[in-house]
Amino acid sequence: MRFTKDEIRQSMLLYAVTDSSWLKPGETLPQVTEAVLANGATFLQIREKEMDHDAFLAEARALQAAAKRHHVPFVVNDAIDIALELDADGVHVGQSDIAGKDVRAMIGPDRILGISAGTVEEAVAAERSGADYIGVGAMFDTSTKAIQRTLSLEELRSICDAVSIPVVAIGGINARTILHLEGGGADGAAVVSAIFAQPDPGRATADLLALARRVFGRP
């Protein structure tokens, strides 16, 4: 594996998920992402739902290079074909993406596999199927995607207690809500609009990193 199990756990602290819909005139996603990584994001996931294959590949390649410069793991959301074509560090998939598939077999033993889970049962099944980490949520209301319900801190703690692999909390996490994750057992927080929708994404990243260190007990 390109990153050790301990390195993956450490990299969960401030997990940035891209969202190009928030780009301002004249900005590019690689430009903004470079600022985000330079200001302390510890993990990078590219998520593009509407982009065609060639454009997605080109954008992902630029972000992959930035992540490599900053020694940060880089994974592709859902698009396993893109991840393999890039030779990305790994993929992150949701519950709907793993039905009837052995994603671990598809990506091989050395790439990072992240799987979303909202229950103890889903989390345990994800670990058994070869996940290296679990994204748990949604923790709070979010405008990024439609959600049916949010999880309580107790539910997050139950999931963390049920698995031995790292857990990153996701969904509606920002500079205010991240404080409510303390004591939940997660290894870090994944954020989207709390970084990419902000006037200064780099500054937002630095501020969130300081909060994440406090909440998750990291130096």
Image (spheres, rainbow, N blue to C red):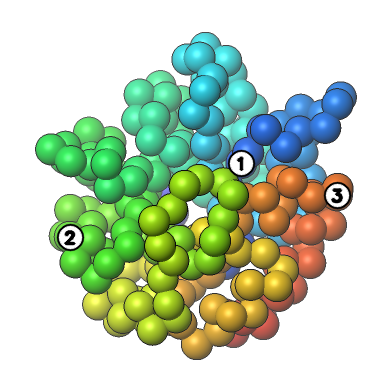
> Which residue, given by chain and number where applicable, does mark 3 sit on?
200
Above or below: residue 34 compared with residue 188: above
* Residue 97 x, y percent position in the rendering: 28, 38
Other residues around mark 2 within 10 Å, as few (<14) / some (14–19) / many (≥20)? some
Of mark 1 and mark 3, the one earlier in the sequence is 1
Above or below: residue 43 compared with residue 106: below
Q: Amino acid at mark 1?
A: Thr
- Which residue is outermost to the bottom? 183
Instruction: Please indicate, yes or no, whether residue 30 appears anywhere in the rendered image.
Output: no
Do tag 1 and tag 3 residues touch (Cβ < 8 Å)? no
- With 118 as the anchor, is 168 left or right in this view? right
Q: Which residue is found at the position 71% from the left and 52% from the top?
A: 195
SS at circle 3:
loop
Of mark 1 and mark 2, the one earlier in the sequence is 1
Q: Nearer the viewer, residue 57 or 158?
A: 158
Other residues around mark 3 within 10 Å, as few (<14) / some (14–19) / many (≥20)? few
Q: Which residue is found at the position 64% from the left and 27% from the top?
A: 62
Other residues around mark 1 within 10 Å, as few (<14) / some (14–19) / many (≥20)? many
Instruction: Please indicate, yes or no, whether residue 80 appears anywhere in the rendered image.
Output: yes
CA gap between label 1 and label 2 equals 27 Å
> Which residue, given by chain and number where applicable, does mark 2 sit on?
125
Q: Nearer the viewer, residue 96 or 3?
A: 96
> Which residue, given by chain and number where applicable, does mark 1 sit on?
18
Do tag 1 and tag 2 residues touch (Cβ < 8 Å)? no
Q: Amino acid at mark 3?
A: Asp
Q: Amino acid at mark 2?
A: Ala
CA gap between label 1 and label 3 equals 14 Å
Q: Which mark is residue 159?
A: none
